Amino acid sequence: MKLKLSRRRMLRGLGVSMAVPWMESLTAAGEPAVAGATAAEPPLRLAVLFAGNGFHSKEWWAKGSGREMELGKVLEPVADFREKLLFVKGLYNAEATKGNIHSSQTGNILSGAPLASGGEIRSGTSFDQHLAQTYGRGTKVPSLVLGCEKSNPSVHKNYSMLYSSHISWSSPTTPTPLEIYPALAFDRLFKDEAHAGDVSVLDAVLETADDLRRRISVADRRKLDEYLDSVRDVEARIESAGKKGELQGWRPTLEKPDIPRPADGIPQDIAEHMRLMCDILVLAFQTDTTRIVTLKLNNDHSALRFPNLPRTDNPSQGIDYMIHHLLSHSDGADWLVVNRFFMEQMAHVARRLDAIQEGERTALDNSMVLMCSSMMAGAKHDNDQLPLVVLGRAGGKIETGRVLDYTGQSDRQMCRLYLSLMEKMGVREKTFGDATTPLAEV
Amino acid sequence: MNRLQRSLFGCLFAIAAAVTAADERSPPDRFGGLSAGSATQAVETAAVNAADAAAKPVLARYCLDCHAGDAAEGEVDLSFTHDAATLRTHTKLLQRVEDMVISGQMPPPESDQPTDEERRVLADWLQAFLAAEARAHAGDPGRVVLRRLNNAEYTHTIRDLTGVAGLDPAKQFPADGGAGEGFTNTGQSLVMSPSLATKYLDAAKGIAAHAVLLPDGLRFSPADSRRDFADEAVVRLKDFYARSTRPLAVTEAAAQQTVKHGIILDTGSEGFLPTEKYLLATLADRERLAQGRESVAAVARERGLSPKYLATLFTALSAPDSTSPGAATADGASPILDLLRARWKSAQPADAAALASFVGDWQKAVWKFNHAGHVVSRFGALDGPPSWMEATTPLVERQEIRLKLVVPEGSDTVTIHLATGDAGDGPDHDVVVWKNPRLVAPGRADLPLAMVRPLPRSATGPLRAGNEPSQDKAGPANAGDEGGGVGLDPTLFGRHPQGLAVEAGDLCMQSPGVIAVTIPADLAEGAEFVTEARLHPETAAEASVQVEVRADATSSLPAGGLVPAVPVVARKDSTAWLRFERAFADVRDLFPRAVCYGRIVPVDEVVTLNLYYREDDHLRRLMLEDDETRELDRLWDELVFIAQEPLEFEDAFEQILGYASQDRPDLVKRWKPLKPAVAAAAEAFKKRLVEVEPRHVDGVVALAGRAFRRPLEAREEARLRTLYDTLRTKDLPHEEAVRTLIAHVLVAPEFLYKLETAGPGTDAKPVSDYELATRLSYFLWSSMPDAELLAAAESGQLHQPEVLKAQVRRMLAAPASRRLAEEFGTQWLHVYGFSSLDEKNAESFPTFAGLRADMEEETVLFLDDFFRNDRSILSLIDADHTVLNERLAKHYCVEGVTGEEWRRVDGMRKHGRGSILCLATTLSTQAGASRTSPILRGNWLYETILGEKLPKPPKDVPQLAETVPAGLSERQLIAMHSENAACAKCHRRIDPFGFALEEFDAIGRLRTADASGNSLDTKAVLPDGAMLDGQESLRTYLLGPRREQFVRVFCRKLLGYALGRGVQLSDQPLLDDMIARLAANDYRVSVAIEAIVTSPQFLSIRGRDVADEAT
């Protein structure tokens, strides 16, 4: 143990630290390798990308299979990966069709849970966060929850706009805060925030917990526990900094970041912002710092504009109007441009991952990259079925190059897909959200 | 009832959608002591029962066909209505049913319709039941989810806690969400996660880095390094000094500089006595000052002067002549002050500058400056200047004179004047001997002045010495040859005016007088005139004179005067000598040139032996009262402590020795012996550092009490101290341990969360006075309670209504109440964070981005004025003023507002301003990126301002183009959309409001045509028949038929914000009461605020064991 301490100290002394995922020296020093950790297998990763307000109603489609698969114009940016692509049609979240438009279509997209209205906040733990709390325990950072648009503070039509801004939920009452600063997302992965007194500081917080819990109401205890659990989590992370590698047995293809820490602040240009976040996602996978990343490209009911993209009717001007209403509701040519811009982010992630060789496969083969939205078409606010496309083969566990169509079937819950995906990562649940069986075809 | 007008649309599906399982749960039944009296309840129960009997058959006939059992339409199962007991657990659903029945949305058109009478019966029953329920639970504190400080509260609290306004620790925190009534201070929306906890920890450590460790505790600084802390301590001292002193003017300061080896050596230009200000006060306020001490204090206060020094100066100046302010001289005279007094007595205020100049000349004569960096007095006996400012006494027994002779261009002679003055005390005994006056030139023998003779015209060749004496027997004063003769009458030499013996070459004369001597150019060339002036030993033993030799005829020595520019010559220890010594000392005592070394950090020498130099004895002696001196001592001690000066100096000293050894081995030799003293000082300081360590831990304990917003319990304090000890045992140095301890306090849940102790069981109980203080200050200030509010809590009186109201008044008047406008106001109006609103097309509205911050500020200031000045809630709609600066005034086309600063501007209605309806923020937010949106504006008015609810829009709504198709006006475009039958249900409710506001463009400017150039049509008719036309008509409408509703929604929002939760049925009686009280009190907003803070909801907390509705 002494050896470990001094190594951590040494890393800290170098001023740069990161997850050091394997430690031959330590193993050599007599620590037995953890049972079941097979060093050869690359891990599975999950990335969920989300773009709010749906897609162009006529151009989101796929047919055929494999190399011959045909894609609608929205999906063209990922055409290179059609053999590693799974187009899933017809799934939906029943609960999301019950409330209002927008907010109540988004807050439960990854959980299928009912949403509370009237100023209350309650959804369900999303499947990415469920994975973070199980599968994600194996990495330095259990999951990264990123966004490119600030969350909206208001209450809209009796539903908190937190629902529009958060697809990841750590618990039914806790939307996972989004990191929208690229530099801070980078720090979360690679900065060693441990400081000599940190553990003591956090220990002392936990010490008071019992006293505090006794005096407050039963209901408040739950809220306080949200904090205490977070503190415990941070503490555990500090204490185990650098220890993970030896448990994982997987040697990542990249030992330390190969891009510089992004500049502080939020990039002015939305394209640059999204690109940075995508790069951080890839970097996180490549260094095996985390295996679960959620990236919300924009909010549902978003206020983004796209002056960087040329208008179709006048290319000298940008698409400088709000995505919500005036753009997404129109189904026009500009909307298609914006849709493709979102899909290009996904293509970028796929391209980068596919360039990383991990044994016989690429990192994309060992990943599942989802693109989803809160509704099918912004013009209709319809979520009777949801747009969904998956890139990557889950280490060969998903047969790709296919179109799956569940339209008209009775058990077409989106949560069935989540059960399937979780199963790929070794997390087998009997039920999730409103689903009890995984999708056999996936 | 207004409710009748509400929600006339929607469909059953909308109820089903909006009503979730949670909505159906009603608040728990028991709120001990807070529910309505049982007698009232009995009456109500009877009324409800009667209505019940009549209504139940109607309900059964028209509703339960569809809404019962497992297959209930829209998942709304009303079968619970059979049972009186279950009825009470479904109040939220029944509120919805009431809306549907009253608005006629239910039963649906295709079903059997009840008669008007049946509908009325049903409505009466629902209303009576719900009203009774509301009253039964009135005052229920409700379920307030434990609240974390939101980002704004956290930021304000950190700033108030540390006293550092510039800290912005939450800058990169995730944005807060809204819940409850739509505010970010609601527990449900204030989430936590490991990544956020990490941010709090990092922020806490960052804030702790701003802590400055002081000899007696802690404070916080905008900076976070020792170097900056020390600089701040220097600034504090400089500020202290600057209060009592003046800096030198640029020219004076330049005169203070000397240049050595090309380096400007500055002896300091700060800390000088502001003589003129004081003299002016003594002249201008002469009468009041003569009245005595109180007036002195008053005058000093008015003029920002030291009462102590003003009194001293006034006494000295108004004293009779020849009375020294200090000990009396031998003969009681003080020649210089006497001169000043004489001038002062006849002076007017306008003469202050002249008097100051007179004093200044004398100050320069009696003081000189050294380089502060060279002063080594702190080490005891060592060569070097004793102080920065050093006393000089311009008093000599003999005055040597050397004057370089310069022959004026084109002249063959040069004339010098040997002048004597009587030093202002009369000519008695004043016999001056000019010893051996001579011309001295290199390479030549000295030529005594007595030998300088006019050359005979015949003479040729070199000068002949020893020529014949002149026949002119005139006195020495007239000596010389007016016709161009040179030299002096030889008989003048070696002769005493009274005939006594004098050495041959000496020139002896009675003072005052002038001897002019003309010297031929060839003798003067390259020569100096040298002599020494003395008093004649026998006849002038008690004399005092001033002498000078000048090339020009205008002597500075007036007959019968004393001048500061030249020394006084007297015989040592003579009466005259002692008198002048005293006179100079008097000037120094009363008029030190500088009262302190205001620069503090010597920069006047390359090598300095003082990192910080203190010299302020005159300031303390003349100007400071005892408490001020103590404060000054404390500031100095802080500086030394913060800078760790003895330790720093020990390092610096070694470096100085090393540096000096290169070219000044002599200095090294001189300074080396200081080493033990330097080391000893450092050692002593280290010991002191250890001794004061507990003070810093005490400081954190005190900080924790403030951070937790209540006194610490003994074991909480013990825990903090234990943590400190633990940190020390982990090899953290003291300072780091203290900072870590601070970080702990700032991540403690007691700080980050508004923890409140709930009572046992399920009964509500009053919150403690400390908890109440926290509720109050976060409501009104978005921050922690200040000392006064905590004191009120400590006294145990805060919960008393009068005390509470007094605090509310005080707090609303304080600057921090602006945050009520910032947080509540802008969130209520949906313009929160407007300054970063990035939704406008930059090409259509190029000025928008640059105006956003101004637009937001107007809204905040308008609302701030509303709260701070207790205005009518109605004025939010119909005010005739707004708050503008030049930029925004230009945006609004309002003339006559210039400059950056914000001011209230009246008469704004004629410009279409002065209402929340016409703010650039609200108008811009509720508009598109490049055009207006009557729909958004109308919806905002309908839902946000009037609190109405629209049903969910139908699916597949056809959408509007971003740009208006040719040939259509914007309004026609909207009308086209709204004509769709499915859409019209809602749009006829909301669009008219938006049309009325069409006179404003998408960034809030008044306009006469829409973006396509079509003329505006601001006329519209509401479903209730009201005709609208422009924003003025909206004001009339809102404050007419909709007045109560507008006020009710405002109160509801304010209540929800104050409580941090959604408003519930049991709050209705409070809202009713608020509205009644407002109507009787001109709708002043303080009435609403007071009603809230004195309500049981605000004053109490639900019992600990009330089940969580959110499970």
Image (cartoon, helix red, strand yellow):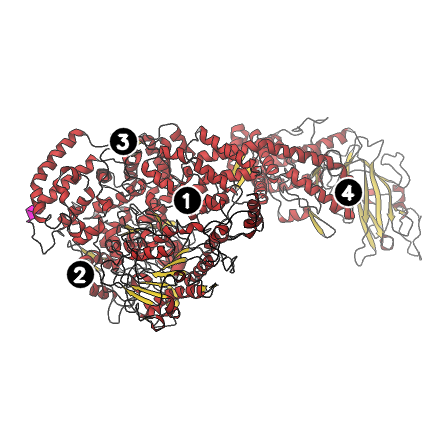
**Answer yes or no: do the residues labelled 4 and 1 have beta carbons within 8 Å?**
no
Q: Can you identify the residue that label 4 sits on?
A: B667
Q: Say which residue label 1 marks.
A: A230
Please tell me the numbered disc located at residue B953: none
Instruction: Check the image and report above or below for B848 versus B680.
Output: below
Is residue B66 among what the camera can see? yes
**Tag in front: 2 or 3:** 3
Percent across and percent down for residue A277 are 43, 59
- Report how far apart the C-alphas of labels 2 and 3 lie in the structure: 49 Å
Amino acid type assigned to the residue bearing label 2 in the image:
Ala
- Tag 2 residue: B982
Q: Name the residue under label 3.
A: B763
Instruction: Identify the magenta region.
Output: B110-118
Q: Earlier in the sequence, mark 4 or mark 3?
A: 4
Q: Which of pointers 4 and 3 indicates the residue nearer the eye?
A: 3
Is B114 one of the magenta-colored residues? yes
Of all chains, the one bearing label 3 is B
Magenta segment includes B730 = no
Q: Distance between the residues labelled 4 and 1?
A: 63 Å
Q: In which quarter of the image is residue B352?
A: top right
Q: How far apart are marks 4 and 3 (CA)?
A: 83 Å
Q: Disc 4 is attached to a residue of which chain?
A: B
User: Image quarter for residue B26?
Assistant: top left
Disc number lying in front (2 or 4): 2
Chain letter of disc 2? B
